[in-house]
Image (spheres, rainbow, N blue to C red):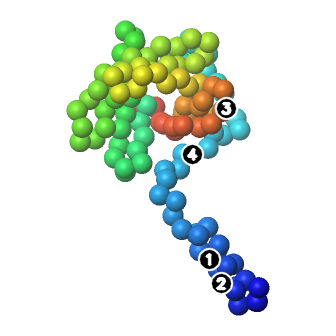
Amino acid sequence: MNIKRWSCIGLALVLYGCAPSGGHTVKPVSASAVALDDEQVRSTLIGNKLKNIGPSGLPYSLSFNADGTEIFKMSGNDPETEHWSVKDGVICFTSVKIPHECYRLKKDKDDYWLVDPQTGAVHYHYTLAPQ
């Protein structure tokens, strides 16, 4: 291959790396974040809501009740009732739209993350507010 062809390939790779991915990035878990146990999860979530901005740019929240219900509310949509439970520090959600999703809740200062309990992959980042 000649130098002109290599230059074109190099430029294409650079431009590909700079192109927006279209994906939604999640704030990484800080090194000082701690996983909450069952009691800490309950005392943190009950009577409060986790808030964030979704990939669509719309705000949404998850409001937690002591009876095991959680209200998912996305701006512009009707609220949806889901169910949540916690065991061994893992919080699980079920609803008509979500058959079963489980995460470990991690906290650092005002930041909260839902993390895959097996892989450690970060799925969601939130802030906490009263209901």
Name which of mark 1 and mark 4 comes first in the sequence. Answer: 1
Name which of mark 3 and mark 2 comes first in the sequence. Answer: 2
Q: Quadrant of the N terminus?
A: bottom right
Circle 3 Cα neighbour tier, 10 Å, few/some/many (<14 / 14–19 / ≥20): few
Q: Indicate the amino acid at tag 2.
A: Cys
Q: CA distance from mark 1 to mark 4?
A: 29 Å
Q: Nearer the viewer, mark 3 or mark 1?
A: 1
Where does residue 3 sit, x and y in percent of width and height? 76, 89
Where does residue 16 sit, x and y in percent of width and height? 59, 70
Q: Residue at x 57, y 11 (%)?
A: 87
Tell me the SS state at disc 1: helix
Q: CA distance from mark 1 to mark 2?
A: 6 Å
Q: Indicate the amino acid at tag 4.
A: Lys
Q: CA distance from mark 4 to mark 3?
A: 17 Å
Question: Mark 2 sits on what residue?
Answer: 8
Q: Are marks 3 and 2 in contact (CB under 8 Å)?
A: no
